[in-house]
Image (cartoon, rainbow, N blue to C red):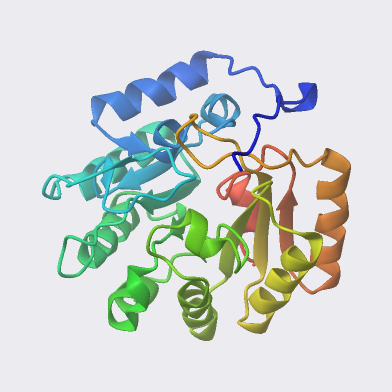
């Protein structure tokens, strides 16, 4: 039976807005021909973040080799990697005057190393040009290949994230290739080397409260300490449907439950995305 369309509640409607900082961010990104998950993912916080001079850079091109049912990023056969992209990202971080840079990527299953070396070079270029900038990376699963993930971890970014996206039951339905256990293993690898492990869940896909809490327990068991919870928003009618709009009060309750389970930092709200307020997730110094 087809899921009926659910009208978006008033408290989920946002104003994109624009100001001088927003326009500067857009100009810098366009100048260096860079992609952002802010745009490709149709993030509802793009206006707020860009107005604060914050953006999440998406490396590896604009075309993903996977076709997850929740994601608005283009899928297909990617172009070859741009060897100048790591430096252009670093240039943009410098031009925007960022104190904290967030980097993510499309999946590049077409490459022998799935883009691992490109990730390493991007981190190194930022460190070289902007040595005082802290870095958060939101990495793919690399099919769970520890030898491809290790070189990125050896660069010691301040925070390493990998998104679970949803609960175990819904993973094979909404994710095209990634598995629940593989994502847990990636987070375990991050935590094992002593780096802050972070993940994000989308809610409103049809998961139950019990499944959410079980996923939290699984995450804590592998050492994940930072969690984001946000409302799934259907990018288009061809994507996976929204089964429920979660009220802000319930997000508040889930945040308290997550903190009680031992998470160090929890961002929970309808418009929260994995890189929202990322600068707050840095480990204490």
Compared to residue 67, the image places residue 94 above or below, namely: above
| Horizontal arrangement in the rendering, residue 101 relative to residue 127 (left or right) | right
Numbered-mark total: 0
Q: Position of residue 53 (x, y in %)?
A: 51, 31
In the rendered image, which quarter is residue 226 located in?
bottom right
Residue 145 in sight in this render: yes
Q: Position of residue 161 (x, y in %)?
A: 51, 62
Of residues 209 and 249, which is closer to you in this image? Answer: 209
Residue pictured at 70% horizontal, 29% vertical: 6
Q: Position of residue 60 (x, y in %)?
A: 25, 50
Q: Where is residue 284 in the image (x, y as percent from the top left)?
A: 67, 66
Residue pictured at 11% horizontal, 49% vertical: 80
Tell me the quarter of the image containing the N terminus: top right
Residue 264 in sight in this render: no
Outermost residue toward the front in this view: 1
In the rendered image, which quarter is residue 191 located in?
bottom right
| Horizontal arrangement in the rendering, residue 10 relative to residue 137 (left or right) | right
Tell me the quarter of the image containing the C terminus: bottom right
Residue pictured at 50% horizontal, 21% vertical: 21
| Horizontal arrangement in the rendering, residue 214 relative to residue 147 (left or right) | right
Compared to residue 188, the image places residue 19 above or below, namely: above
């Amino acid at each position: 039976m087809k899921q009926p369309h659910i009208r978006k509640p008033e408290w989920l409607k946002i104003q994109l807005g624009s100001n001088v900082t927003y326009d500067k961010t857009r100009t810098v990104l366009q100048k260096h021909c860079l992609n952002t998950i802010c745009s490709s993912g149709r993030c509802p916080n793009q206006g707020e973040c860009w107005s604060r001079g914050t953006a999440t850079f998406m490396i590896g091109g604009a075309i993903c080799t996977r076709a997850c049912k929740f994601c608005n990023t283009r899928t297909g056969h990617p172009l070859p990697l741009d060897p100048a992209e790591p430096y252009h990202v670093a240039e943009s971080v410098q031009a925007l005057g960022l104190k904290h840079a967030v980097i993510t990527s499309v999946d590049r299953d077409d490459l022998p190393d799935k883009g691992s070396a490109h990730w390493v070079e991007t981190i190194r270029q930022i460190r070289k040009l902007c040595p005082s900038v802290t870095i958060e990376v939101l990495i793919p699963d690399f099919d769970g290949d520890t030898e491809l993930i290790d070189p990125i971890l050896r660069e010691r970014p301040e925070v390493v994230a990998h998104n679970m996206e949803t609960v175990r039951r819904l993973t094979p339905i909404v994710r095209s290739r990634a598995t629940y256990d593989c994502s847990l293993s990636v987070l375990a690898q991050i935590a094992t080397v002593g780096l802050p492990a972070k993940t994000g869940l989308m809610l409103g896909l049809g998961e139950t409260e019990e499944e959410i809490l079980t996923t939290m327990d699984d995450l804590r068991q592998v050492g994940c300490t930072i969690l984001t919870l946000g409302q799934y928003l259907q990018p288009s009618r061809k994507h996976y449907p929204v089964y429920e709009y979660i009220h802000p009060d319930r997000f508040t309750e889930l945040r308290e439950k997550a903190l009680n389970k031992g998470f160090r930092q929890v961002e929970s709200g309808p418009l929260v995305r994995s890189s929202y307020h990322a600068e707050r997730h840095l480990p204490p110094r």
